[in-house]
Image (spheres, grey):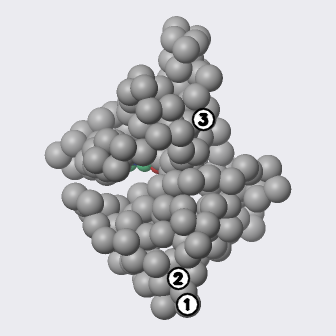
Amino acid sequence: MSLAIYHDAWDLDLAICPCDQHFLDWIAARELRGARIFHFGTGNHHLVGRRSAEDGRGNLVLGITASPREHESYVNLVIDRPELGRTYKVLFGDIYQLEPRLLPEFDVVTLFHLGEFRSEKNAAYGAMTDGELAELLLEKLVPGGWLLFYTGSFAYDVAAAIADRLEARGRLHPAGTFATLRLCRKPV
Ligand SMILES: C[S@@+](CC[C@H](N)C(=O)[O-])C[C@H]1O[C@@H](n2cnc3c(N)ncnc32)[C@H](O)[C@@H]1O
């Protein structure tokens, strides 16, 4: 048994997967500033962390990747551009093993790839389910914080069922859509 890693290194492909760009567009449209963001799936491009470090809005990004090559590209990025590394941090690991006691609180959490990668490989070492992961990160959101889903995901049926259930229980409020993103907020 070994860690359920992501074997690829995902380069930016807006035609196939525009969620990170849509997220940045949403940040710009809302004029979001000083937000603490948890981002599921950095990609090899690190678009969310890079742009957030460059756009002057002061948003802080903690990303996670299960790709050794994406993590290596992050290491090289911050060696080459140390100014990015102050506000953009990347964890390597299986998101389904997040430990809540080691996490701070967040203003925004992206779960764009919820349901895409959870399999029996994660279950073999007792990792969380998709539903448990969503609950954990919801606990880490401040009241009024945002939980965002990607409606273009190939596993959006899984993510939507989880979001619907959390909304039905009053744990999340629906907050509309933006491009391909479904927006939810934690009640105040
Ligand atoms: C298809 S890529 C998408 C990257 C980026 N969000 C985009 O849309 O361009 C999927 C991302 O999810 C990450 N990922 C897959 N399984 C994961 C897991 N179990 N834990 C953490 N990250 C994971 C991969 O490392 C990769 O960064």
Q: Alpha-carbon neighbours of circle 2 within 10 Å: few (<14), some, or many (≥20)?
A: many
Image quarter hosting the C terminus: bottom right
Q: Are marks 1 and 2 in contact (CB under 8 Å)?
A: yes
Residue extending farthest right: 101
Circle 3 packing at 10 Å, graded few (<14), some (14-19), many (20+), is: many
Q: Alpha carbon of mark 2 to alpha carbon of mark 3: how far?
A: 27 Å
Residue 156 appears in which quarter of the rendering? bottom left
Q: Amino acid at mark 1?
A: Arg
Observer-nearest residue: 66 or 150? 150
**Residue at the spot of label 2:** 166
Residue 98 in picture, x, y percent from top left: 70, 56
Q: Is residue 39 left or right of residue 161?
A: right
Q: Residue at x 26, y 60 (%)?
A: 178
Q: How many marks?
A: 3
Dot 2 falls on a residue whose secondary structure is helix
Mark 3 lies on residue: 90
Residue 36 position, x and y percent, is 58, 45
- Callout 3: CB less than 8 Å from ligand 1: no
Whether residue 126 is visible: yes
Disc 3 marks a residue whose amino acid type is Val
- Neighbours of disc 1 within 10 Å: few (<14), some (14-19), many (20+): few
Q: Please name whichever residue, 52 or 162, is drawn nearer the observer in this view of the structure.
A: 52
Residue 169 disc label: 1
Residue found 59% across the figure and 40% down from its top = 62
Q: Earlier in the sequence, mark 2 or mark 3?
A: 3
